[in-house]
């Protein structure tokens, strides 16, 4: 369970710091669903 939490925090940090590369890296995942301000 802790690994999943860390994964969510890591994804959130990546999407927050670099929204464009994050969207390019995860095109199948809608990051805007997780990070509305991305």
Image (tube, grey):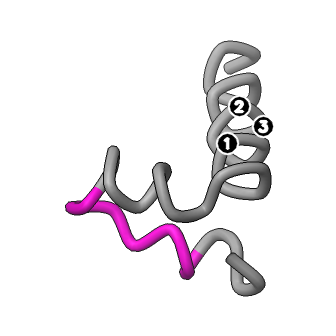
Q: Which residue is at the far top?
A: 3
Label 3 to label 2: alpha-carbon separation = 4 Å
Q: Where is residue 24 in the image (x, y as percent from the top left)?
A: 32, 55
The quadrant of the rendering that contains the N terminus is top right
Q: Distance between the residues labelled 1 and 3?
A: 9 Å
Whether the residues at callouts 3 and 2 have beta carbons within 8 Å, the answer is yes
Q: Is residue 8 above or below residue 30?
A: above
Which of discs 1 and 3 lies nearer the camera? The answer is 1
Point out the residue furthest to the left here.
28
The residue under label 1 is: 14
Q: Nearer the viewer, residue 15 or 6?
A: 15
Q: SS for tag 1?
A: helix
Q: Is 2 on the left or on the right of 15, as rendered?
A: right
Report the quarter where the C terminus lies: bottom right
Residue under the image location 51 percent in, 63 percent down: 20
Q: Mark 2 points at which residue?
A: 10
Span of residues in magenta: 27-33
Disc with the residue nearer the chain's start (1 vs 3): 3
Residue 8 percent across, percent down from the top left? 67, 40
| Closer to the eye: label 2 or 1 | 1
Q: Residue at x 66, y 52 (%)?
A: 18
Asked whether 20 or 13 is in front, the reply is 20
C-alpha separation, residue under disc 2 versus residue under disc 1: 6 Å
| Residue 28 located within the stretch drawn in magenta | yes
Give the residue number, with chain letter if any, for mark 3.
9
- Residue 9 colored in magenta in the image: no
Density class for disc 3 (Cα within 10 Å; few <14, some 14-19, many ≥20) is few
| In contact (CB < 8 Å): disc 2 and disc 1 | yes
Q: Is residue 10 above or below residue 21?
A: above
Q: Position of residue 21 (x, y in %)?
A: 47, 51
């Amino acid at each position: 369970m802790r690994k999943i939490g860390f994964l969510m925090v890591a994804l959130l940090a990546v999407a927050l710091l670099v929204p464009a590369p994050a969207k390019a890296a995860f095109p199948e995942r809608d990051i805007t669903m997780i990070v509305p301000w991305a």
